[in-house]
Image (tube, grey):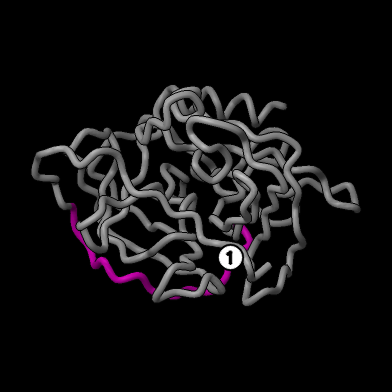
Amino acid sequence: MRSATPMELAGPGQGKGKPDKGGGSAKAVQVPQQPEFGKVFFTLGGSNYVCSGTATQSSNGDVVTTAGHCLNEGPGAFATNFVFVPAYDNGSAPYGQWVATSLRTTSAWANEGDFNHDVGFAVMAENSSGQSLTDVTGSYPIAFNLGYGLTFDAYGYPAAKPYDGQDLWRCSGTAGTDSRGTTDHRLPCSMTGGSSGGGWITGGKLNSVNSFGYRGEKDVMYGPYFGNTEQAVYQSAATS
């Protein structure tokens, strides 16, 4: 599980404009493992990659929320060999390894690679004991259309230098906005590739994921706004 490459995408075209910077320290802090957060392993375009994900409350108990680019080329094919490892810790899998049965993302990401909608949902198979994912790990409820200016804790398994992908890290702060062409939240955060797809928590609810950073803008993470489009895809995954 240690040999995969951290998935890292530069942001969309470098549009003009001065972003609302938001507040908080950009420096990520290492935190204890939590079973709701985990590391994602998958194959895309013939190469093996890693991302991060969050066990998400759903009627079927099987949903992992991540970034769209962690399960679809955007635009292009869906990933294969998608595995979620809750509370991954230096190569160990204390809550098992969960295999996806289906992957879903927004049509805007799958067809256009639109970073405004870089969100994905994986539906996981039950384990060998017949248990659903969130029966074992617990989960975060997901929320939509909460607006902007929120305070977030963003989690992930950054794997590109100076990190090694073996531990859970967190950035905290009040998100600003992106004036360069996306509707995303903007959060000061030093996490790197591999943290993509990690959950942003506000008020105890999942409300965005680590998505991208602009080249030349250090220690800033952008996360998509969870609106009606994302809600529809989530509901499809949650009831499958």
Quadrant assignment, res 171:
bottom left
Please, is residue 123 above or below residue 8 in the view?
Answer: above
Location of residue 132 in the rendering, given as x and y in whole percent from the top left corner: 78, 46
Displayed quadrant of residue 91: bottom right
Q: Is residue 39 left or right of residue 156?
A: right
Residue 239 rendering spot, x and y as whole percentages: 69, 26
Q: Residue at x 48, y 34 (%)?
A: 74
Which residues, given as a range, are shown in magenta? 22-36
Quadrant containing the N terminus in the rendered view: bottom right
Q: Nearer the viewer, residue 150 or 179?
A: 179
Of residues 177 and 44, which is closer to you in this image?
44
Residue 203 seen in render: no
Using residue 129 as the reference point, say whether residue 87 is left or right of it: left
The front one of 79 and 119 is: 79
State the SS at label 1: loop
Above or below, 92 against 122 in this view is below
Q: Is residue 32 magenta?
A: yes
Label 1 belongs to which residue?
Answer: 34
